[in-house]
Image (cartoon, helix red, strand yellow):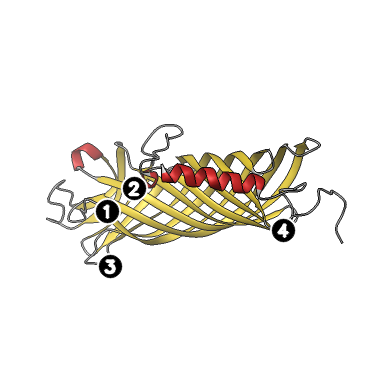
């Protein structure tokens, strides 16, 4: 009940606490966003290296845990593929943002193509040992598993905001938003292989990422908006830890992803200006 009252009071403050004719693209505006995403991945090569093994799995297919756009779990937001973003218009029509994108992916059951070596008696569960050259093996037979329950992509993003349509009083505005971003990736990864088994996974800084995005921002009554978005990028997962006691046991892969998302947000007019589309010098 207290949470709902806080949200209501905050909404009233936004709507009635600011007055005048407002433009969301002006310098000095603060943009707050929350959304959920669905992710799609291209095949990648997963490399795993330690003192007792050094091999790679070619052309593996990663998927998100659920099909389509996952339903948000408001009881536990951290269990969903959420997106958070706070942005600031550094110039008219130029938005600089700090974002957090929680991406989840797993290795579903499939035929694996294995190249490399595994020392004898290391893999007590699947019995994998020897040298392999384009050897095809079934995941079910090996008892092999790989899951990234959370890849938090923390990034800076620079977007251009271009007006496509607006009503005379700006109670409805349609803006195109498109740009580029890059940042760090912090992952929680779990492996089922040999002695590399940890029920809750192992967390740590795992790599870097870069992306491009484009969306349409439907603004209502100057303060609120909904933004469907399309993104694509690359996660350079260079250090996925496989063992907390041995730092040299790591996995890595480069993962190309595509993403559809829906964002909701609000606009805070910190530097109010009159609604004027005349040039500024």
Looking at the image, which residue is at 74% across and 45% down?
A: 162
Residue 77 location, quadrant: top left
Q: Nearer the viewer, mark 4 or mark 1?
A: 4
Indicate which disc residue 201 carries: 1
Q: Residue 13 at what x, y percent from top left?
A: 60, 48
Q: Nearer the viewer, mark 1 or mark 3?
A: 1
First in sequence: mark 4 vs mark 2: 2
Task: From the image, tell me which residue sits under label 3.
Answer: 247
Q: Nearer the viewer, mark 2 or mark 3?
A: 2
Alpha carbon distance from label 4 to label 1: 45 Å
Alpha carbon distance from label 4 to label 3: 50 Å
Neighbor class of circle 3 (other Cα within 10 Å; few <14, some 14-19, many 20+) is few
First in sequence: mark 1 vs mark 3: 1
Q: At numbered mark 2, what does the secondary structure look like: helix, strand or loop?
A: strand
Q: At numbered mark 3, what does the secondary structure look like: helix, strand or loop?
A: loop
Q: Residue 225 at what x, y percent from top left?
A: 62, 40
Horizontal placement of 136 versus 216: left or right?
left
Residue 82 location, quadrant: top left
Q: Are marks 2 and 1 in contact (CB under 8 Å)?
A: yes
- Residue 223 higher or lower than 202, as above or below: above
Q: At numbered mark 4, what does the secondary structure look like: helix, strand or loop?
A: loop
Q: Are marks 4 and 3 in contact (CB under 8 Å)?
A: no
Indicate which disc residue 271 carries: 4
Task: From the image, tell me which residue sits under label 2.
Answer: 149
Indicate which disc residue 131 carries: none
Q: Nearer the viewer, mark 4 or mark 2?
A: 4
Alpha carbon distance from label 1 to label 3: 15 Å
């Amino acid at each position: 009940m207290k949470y709902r009252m806080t949200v209501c009071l905050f909404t009233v403050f936004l709507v009635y606490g600011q007055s005048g004719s407002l433009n969301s693209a002006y310098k000095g505006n603060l943009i707050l966003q929350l959304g959920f995403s669905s992710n799609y991945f291209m095949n990648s090569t997963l490399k795993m290296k330690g003192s007792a093994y050094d091999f790679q799995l070619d052309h593996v297919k990663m998927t998100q845990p659920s099909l389509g756009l996952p339903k948000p779990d408001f009881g536990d937001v951290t269990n969903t593929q959420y997106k958070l973003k706070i942005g600031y218009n550094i110039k008219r029509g130029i938005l600089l943002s700090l974002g957090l994108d929680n991406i989840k992916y797993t290795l579903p059951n499939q035929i694996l193509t294995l190249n490399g070596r595994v020392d004898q008696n290391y893999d007590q569960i699947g019995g994998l040992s020897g040298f392999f050259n384009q050897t095809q093996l079934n995941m079910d037979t090996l008892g092999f598993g790989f899951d990234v329950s959370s890849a938090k992509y923390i990034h800076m993003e620079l977007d251009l905001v271009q007006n496509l349509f607006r009503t005379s009083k700006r109670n409805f505005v349609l803006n195109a938003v498109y740009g580029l971003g890059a940042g760090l990736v912090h992952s929680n990864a779990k492996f089922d292989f040999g002695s590399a088994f940890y029920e809750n996974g192992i967390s740590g800084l795992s790599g870097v990422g870069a992306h491009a995005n484009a969306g349409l921002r439907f603004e209502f009554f100057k303060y609120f908006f909904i933004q469907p978005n399309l993104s694509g990028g690359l996660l350079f997962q260079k250090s996925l830890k496989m063992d907390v006691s041995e730092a040299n046991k790591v996995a890595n892969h480069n993962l190309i992803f595509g993403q559809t998302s829906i964002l909701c947000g609000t606009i805070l007019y910190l530097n109010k200006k009159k609604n004027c589309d005349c040039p500024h010098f």
